[in-house]
Amino acid sequence: MIKFENVSKRYPDGTAAVDSIQFDIQQGEFFVIIGPSGCGKTTTLKMINRLIPLTDGTIFINGKKISEYDIHELRWNIGYVLQQIALFPHMTIEENIAIVPEMKKWEKNKIKTRIHELLDMVGLDHETYAHRKPTELSGGQQQRVGVIRALAADPEIILMDEPFSALDPISREKLQDDLLDLKKNLKKTTVFVTHDMREALKLADRICIMKEGKIVQIGTPHELVTNPANNFVKDFVGAKNGNWTSEIKLEDLLEPVKENEMEQAYTITAPVSTPLKEILEILYEHEQLTIEKDGKLIGHINRGSVMKYLSTTITEERGLTNE
């Protein structure tokens, strides 16, 4: 879907913001780029839609060089969400969302239907919010509009540059949950930049950790937590001794089984004695499994609950907050 081939960005003073990176992003993948300030993550993101021109190498989208696309064609097919929401204050919410579909000459009825569908999808009732101005919405509500505005014309790719970092922790958590739902329902190829490892672990299919313009490691959240490539990754992720799985009790991750679920058959079950490493490997392939003890179902474990537990542990152990 998106391919970086020996891509560099150097400035006239010789500074290498990005230094010969290469990786592939698969169609429908949620790919998170993370690293310390100045590592090149935002530059990498902005080179995809040519907001920043690359110096060397090639970026491909669907096998075609981005330099070969008409710039408007390229950007119309890429939704973009910024930390600064940048809604037009003189326009209604409906008018803000309609901008790109109107530029692409969609029919008015189709645009209106799309706007109502997207607003309802993120919990903003279209009858209540469509005709309001941005100043009548909270920061979290405005950022929801920013996200769905990027989705309005049904682009193949979504770029998100630290979109939630300015929000309070409660709004941020809610928007992350909304994004997980959108990810599951829409399956858009998404490149998401953040400085928050907790956020990365919660949202990503794969995470790319950068340092000083170079890629240090790319892997799933499970791979980075259990098998960091070096001490920088270990410290950045917050993994103790490179292996958290020995320090977590399986029971801490369980969601209880309800009475009406007791007799249901589950295709994927595991005994409570199963090592956590094996549980994580199963969850890499499956969304959820059920844990049993003495022949009885005692709880469920799913990817979301594991990532939330790990990311919360990172925050507590490293003294981090979402602020």
Image (cartoon, rainbow, N blue to C red):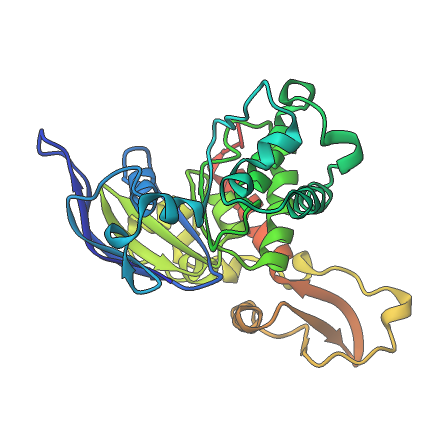
Q: Is residue 40 left or right of residue 161?
A: left
- The answer to whether one can see residue 233 in this image is yes
Q: Nearer the viewer, residue 38 or 101?
A: 101
Above or below residue 323? Residue 226 is below
| Residue displayed at 26% across by 43% down | 211
Q: Nearer the viewer, residue 308 or 78?
A: 78
Position of the N terminus by quadrant:
bottom left
Q: x, y percentage for residue 104?
A: 50, 45
Q: Residue furthest right?
A: 260
Q: Nearer the viewer, residue 74 or 141?
A: 74
Q: x, y percentage for residue 299?
A: 75, 66
Q: Quadrant of residue 187?
A: bottom right
- The answer to whether one can see residue 306 in this image is no
Q: Is residue 70 left or right of residue 157?
A: left
Q: Quadrant of residue 144?
A: top right
Q: Quadrant of residue 293?
A: bottom right
Q: x, y percentage for residue 294?
A: 78, 79
Q: x, y percentage for residue 65?
A: 25, 57
Q: How many marks?
A: 0
Above or below residue 260? Residue 137 is above
Q: Nearer the viewer, residue 47 or 172?
A: 47
